[in-house]
């Protein structure tokens, strides 16, 4: 994460996050790095569909593809970038070690990550199946996947 924060600082870029299943862990990991206040504009934890929609995610996307989908992650990443006027927006959504009775669609333990590059108007997406024994281990697997994806696609 240090490499990412340093890259953002050196390139005068900003980032914002809209996280669901990771519960703000990405923002926490970013803010644990010296200088993070120069790059992290805003972070939203949107566990509910209601608040994803209030943050700008199109309800029709959620209804058509489910809240647990690449399409919803992409919406989350773009809307948080737009809302904060950040260079990069990150959207993370998925199921971690539980069944969601309000959203029965989607595979258990599958997580979708989208990084939106505002300047290029481009999405970088990836997904993974977490297999941590605990929720915390699964959340860290998502963060590690985000770091690999950001390093590969952006840096």
Image (cartoon, rainbow, N blue to C red):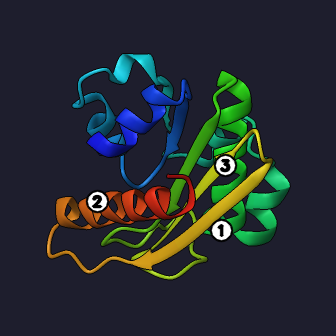
Q: Nearer the viewer, residue 15 or 129?
A: 15
Q: Please name whichever residue, 95 or 114, is drawn nearer the observer in this view of the structure.
A: 114
**Is residue 25 shown above or below 111?**
above
- Please give the name of the residue rendered at 70% of the width and 58% of the height, measured from the top-left corner: 123
Question: Is residue 108 at all visible to an observer of this figure?
Answer: yes
Marks 3 and 1, Cα distance to the nearest angstrom?
12 Å
Quadrant housing residue 25: top left
Q: Which badge, 3 or 1, is on the more N-terminal residue?
A: 1
Nearer the camera: disc 3 or disc 2: 3
In this view, 151 is above or below 36? below
Residue 120 image point, x, y percent: 78, 47
* Residue topped by disc 3: 116
Residue 139: assigned label: 2
Mark 1 Cα shell of 10 Å, populated few (<14), some (14-19), many (≥20): many
Of mark 2 and mark 1, the one earlier in the sequence is 1
Of residue 119 and residue 93, the one placed in the foreground of this image is 119
Residue under the image location 34 percent in, 71 percent down: 98
Measure the alpha-carbon separation of dots 2 and 1.
Answer: 18 Å
- Residue at which label 1 appears: 70
Marks 2 and 3: in contact by CB < 8 Å?
Answer: no
Asked if residue 46 shows in the view, the reply is no
Return the x and y of residue 121 as percentages of the image width and height: 80, 47
Mark whose residue sits in front, 3 or 1: 3
Q: Is residue 153 above or below residue 36?
A: below
């Amino acid at each position: 994460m240090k490499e990412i924060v340093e890259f953002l600082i050196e390139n005068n870029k900003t980032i914002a996050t809209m996280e669901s299943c990771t519960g703000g862990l990405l923002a926490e990991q970013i803010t644990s790095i010296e200088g993070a206040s120069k790059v992290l504009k805003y972070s939203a934890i949107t566990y509910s569909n209601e608040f994803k929609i209030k943050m700008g995610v199109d309800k029709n996307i959620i209804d058509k593809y489910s809240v647990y989908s690449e399409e919803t992650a992409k919406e989350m990443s773009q809307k948080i970038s737009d809302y904060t006027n950040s260079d990069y927006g990150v959207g993370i959504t998925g199921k971690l070690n539980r069944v969601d009775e309000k959203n029965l669609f989607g595979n258990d333990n599958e997580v979708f990550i989208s990084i939106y590059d505002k300047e290029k108007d481009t999405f970088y997406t990836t997904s993974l199946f977490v297999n941590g024994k605990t929720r915390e281990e699964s959340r860290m697997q998502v963060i590690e996947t985000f770091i690999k994806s950001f390093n590969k696609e952006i840096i």
